């Protein structure tokens, strides 16, 4: 009807214009509601991404704490083992034993050297006797 009125140049009355504006407002309201809902959805999406990032951060922190606890437990066990080893191996006695062993090895080295020299002398005399026989 409006298009016919525009062709003939008839102006709409005030009542008709009010009705037209009310219709336009009614059709715009769902669009506005939809736009508001779209904005809310986008905000919620952003919040969800932020929450996900925070949860991932918390998960990494928990994994880090777990690894720290495991290392702490291993160090505690290692300390216990070291205490037990220290209890078994008395350092002064071990040191004294090592000194005695060193002295014995030195004596043995000297004796080995003397025996080696004796065998060399014996070999030299055997070589001379063989040379004399030939």
Image: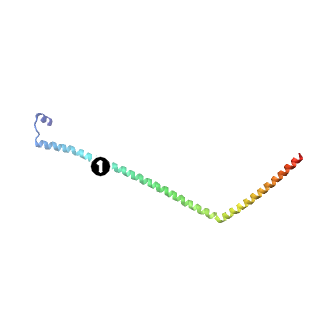
Are there few (<14), some (14-19), or many (20+) residues within 10 Å of tag 1? few
The residue identified by callout 1 is 40
Mark yes or no: residue 90 visible. no
Choose between 10 and 97: the one closer to the eye. 97
Residue 54 lies left or right of residue 97; in this view the side is: left
Q: Is residue 127 above or below residue 12?
A: below
| Place of residue 28 in the rendered image (x, y in percent of width and height, measured from the top left) | 21, 44
Residue 97 lies left or right of residue 122; in this view the side is: left
- The quarter holding residue 98 reads bottom right
Choose between 55 and 121: the one closer to the eye. 121
Residue at the spot 51% in from the left edge and 59% down from the top edge: 72
| Place of residue 76 in the rendered image (x, y in percent of width and height, measured from the top left) | 54, 61
- The quarter holding residue 103 reads bottom right
Residue 128 lies left or right of residue 90; in this view the side is: right
Q: Which residue is outermost to the top?
A: 7
Mark yes or no: residue 48 visible. yes
């Amino acid at each position: 009807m409006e298009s016919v009125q525009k062709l003939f140049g008839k102006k709409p009355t005030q009542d008709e214009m009010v009705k037209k504006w009310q219709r336009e407002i009614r059709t715009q309201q769902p669009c506005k509601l939809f736009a508001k809902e779209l904005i809310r959805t986008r905000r919620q999406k952003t919040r969800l991404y932020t929450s996900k990032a925070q949860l991932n951060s918390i998960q990494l922190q928990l994994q880090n704490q777990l690894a720290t606890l495991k290392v702490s437990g291993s160090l505690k066990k290692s300390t216990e083992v070291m205490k037990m080893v220290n209890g078994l191996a008395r350092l002064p006695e071990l040191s004294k034993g090592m000194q005695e062993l060193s002295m014995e090895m030195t004596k043995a080295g000297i004796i080995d050297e003397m025996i080696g020299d004796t065998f060399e002398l014996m070999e030299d005399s055997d070589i001379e006797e063989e040379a004399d026989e030939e």
